[in-house]
Image (tube, rainbow, N blue to C red):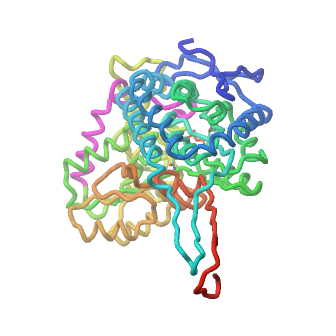
Amino acid sequence: MKYPEVQNYINGQFVSCNNKRMDVDSPLTGAVISTVPLSAYNDVDEAVKSAKAAFPAWSGMTSKMRSQILYTYRMIVEQNVEILASIIHDENGKTMDEAIAEVRKSIELTEFACSVPQIAVGEVLEVSVGVECRTEYAPLGVVACINPFNFPHMVPHWTLPNAIAMGNCMVLKPSELTPVSSMKMAEMFKQAGLPDGVLNIVNGAKEVVEAICDHPDIKAVSFVGSTPVAQLVYRRAASNLKRCLALGGAKNHLIVLPDANLDLSASDIAASMCGSAGQRCMAASVMIAVGNVNPIIDKLCLEVSKYIPGTKMPPIISRKSRENLIRYIDEAEAKGAKLLVDGRKFSSDEHADPNGYYLGPTIIDWRETVTGMPDSEVFGPVFEIIQAGSVEEALSIQHKSPFGNAASAFTQNGAIAKMVAQNASAGMIGINIGVPVPREPFSFGGWNASKFGAGDITGKSSLGFWSQLKKVTSKWAKQEITDWMS
Ligand code: NAD
């Protein structure tokens, strides 16, 4: 095996657990590169005990002291970009360039957390003569985050740096499909001087998630993954009276008009649908063609042909996910949809291992079918085209989607772009942008079935999630002049 066995990380130590193990295969080759333990309730309990023991000292530090450790961590990540990226490349399959971008994004997220002492500052006001009221952000205690496979390093950085900067101690669960890079993350935090117990990692699958939702000493849970699991987690954590923010799946609509810039639109949409083999919750999923946009569609078909499986186009995460995608394409074809580009028949370059889980880019045209496009998420390099007669109709189609992560307009008409931005039912809007991810300090989060819970998962919005406000009202002397509260 290329990597050592994945272990849990509890109280600053890698610990072996006696539970069953699962193979971790690399989607690049299908070969087993490590194994991961399928931990149980008692492993989560150990992690919680360690986090609970670390909490008084960690929360007792000033946020400026905590942010110093994050600065050091950021520097260590910077020194390890290539090493981390190559682990991500192996475990997730994404290209080295994509993996490097993922690590760079985690650096940006850490930088935001370093600025917590400048942002999470309380307010003070003399509310009555001689009476002062001030607010302060208090941490919650032990918190947890549950992560998906598609950004094994970045998504944990949506939550971990901000949560610990605010004074909490964390139990983190990686995806069992991509658990290797989190061992490197733990090592780097240790090297940065993070006190033992502030970060704990428990590996595994459903049982770990359920234990996190049920454990009475975990105060808040963040989740990122598919909508059905987000719903389960949100319901279970909330029924145990925990704070929960659960981000789910997506099917992102692009409203494309005939006046859109031909070259820019085609290359941007191709990059959005093919990047990370379409396994991004912000990937372009559906074009709603308003009027005749056939020149853009023709150009898009040419652009996607550049994403040859291998160096440019990574594999799908697992054999099973690849089979599900092929089944979706087969069913679309059986329903009469036209395959403008058929990723089932692809030729790869010399860098693609024949045992890798590759699939070529696929464009499904539903415009002449009776049944219409299903509204389910398709997490892969599959782009679908439907038709609308007007922007109003396009918006009403977008509103019928159960999801609401991203929506974009491709047009040169500012008024139409503004209309889409104002009226689309989605949390993140792109204007001539295929992947409208808001960068720091803006916050990340969708609407509808793409997110359950209040607030967003990154940026300023997340600071409220990882803390509670304490209000201190004080009076120190008897006042000469008083009012009703003095
Ligand atoms: P997933 O829902 O299968 O798994 C996510 C996590 O939940 C993993 O840690 C997994 O171990 C756990 N899990 C899986 N099934 C479970 C169950 N039945 N009960 C309890 N826990 C369970 O998601 P994934 O396949 O790892 O990731 C891809 C999905 O994540 C896509 O749907 C994608 O859209 C979504 N995603 C969303 C965002 C966002 O910001 N909204 C970001 C990234 C990924």
Quadrant (top left, top right, bottom left, bottom right) of the N terminus: top right
| Front-most of residues 37 and 459 | 459
Residue 74: where, in percent of width, then height?
Answer: 43, 34
Residue 300: where, in percent of width, then height?
Answer: 27, 45
- Kindly tell me whether residue 103 is visible in this rendering: yes
Residue 384: where, in percent of width, then height?
Answer: 40, 50
Question: Residue visible at 55% across and 15% down?
Answer: 3
| Quarter residue 179 falls in | top right
| Front-most of residues 101 and 395 | 101
The answer to whether residue 383 is left or right of residue 474 is: left
- Kindly tell me whether residue 330 is visible in this rendering: no
Taking the magenta stretch, the answer to whether it contains residue 322 is: yes
Quadrant (top left, top right, bottom left, bottom right) of the C terminus: bottom right
The answer to whether residue 277 is left or right of residue 194 is: left
Question: Residue visible at 50% across and 25% down?
Answer: 27
Q: Which residues are magenta?
A: 294-323
Residue 443: where, in percent of width, then height?
Answer: 45, 54
| Front-most of residues 401 and 479 | 479
Question: Residue visible at 44% across and 50% down?
Answer: 336
> Outermost residue toward the top?
1
Taking the magenta stretch, the answer to whether it contains residue 308 is: yes
Instruction: Classify 4 as above or below 388.
Output: above
Instruction: Classify 23 as above or below 134.
Output: above
| Quarter residue 49 falls in | top right
| Front-most of residues 377 and 109 | 109
Assign ligand 1 to one image quadrant: top right
Question: Residue visible at 65% across and 48% down?
Answer: 221
Badge count: 0
